[in-house]
Amino acid sequence: MNGTAEQYDRLVDVDGNYTYVGEAEPGSAQSGSIWRIKRITETGEDLEIVWANGSAEFDKVWDDRASYSY
């Protein structure tokens, strides 16, 4: 390890009670299968954070974020 943190492009989309957060390598296309996406659900003061399809792998498409299982 060289002591530097990996920097990713980050996109955020708020849709009702859901907030989607996607990360990918800088310059990545939103239509590419190179994103990791999590959904944050707000219920009162509680937050639930879950990964798309149960995985933090960089193999999701940002444009399809609402269609994944969470």
Image: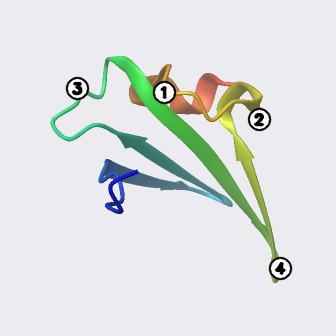
Q: Is residue 54 above or below residue 5?
A: above
Q: Is residue 8 left or right of residue 46?
A: left
Question: What residue is drawn where x is 36% and y is 59%?
Answer: 5
Q: Earlier in the sequence, mark 1 or mark 2?
A: 1
* Percent coordinates x, y for residue 14 in the rendering: 50, 57
Give the mark nearer the N terminus: 2 vs 3.
Answer: 3
Q: In 3D space, how far apart are the residues under numbered discs 4 and 2 (Cα atoms)?
A: 19 Å
> What colour scheme was applied to this rendering of the protein?
rainbow
Q: What residue does disc 1 label?
A: 58
Q: Residue at x 50, y 19 (%)?
A: 59
Quarter of the image for residue 30 reads top left
Q: Is residue 63 above or below residue 5?
A: above
Which kind of residue does numbered mark 1 sit on? Phe
Which amino acid lies under the numbered mark 3 shown in the image of this protein? Answer: Ala
- Under tag 1, what secondary structure? loop
**Is the residue marked by circle 1 packed among few (<14), some (14-19), or many (20+) residues within 10 Å?**
some
Question: Which sits earlier in the primary sequence, circle 4 or circle 2?
Answer: 4
Label 4: which residue?
44
User: Which residue in the protein does label 2 denote?
Assistant: 70
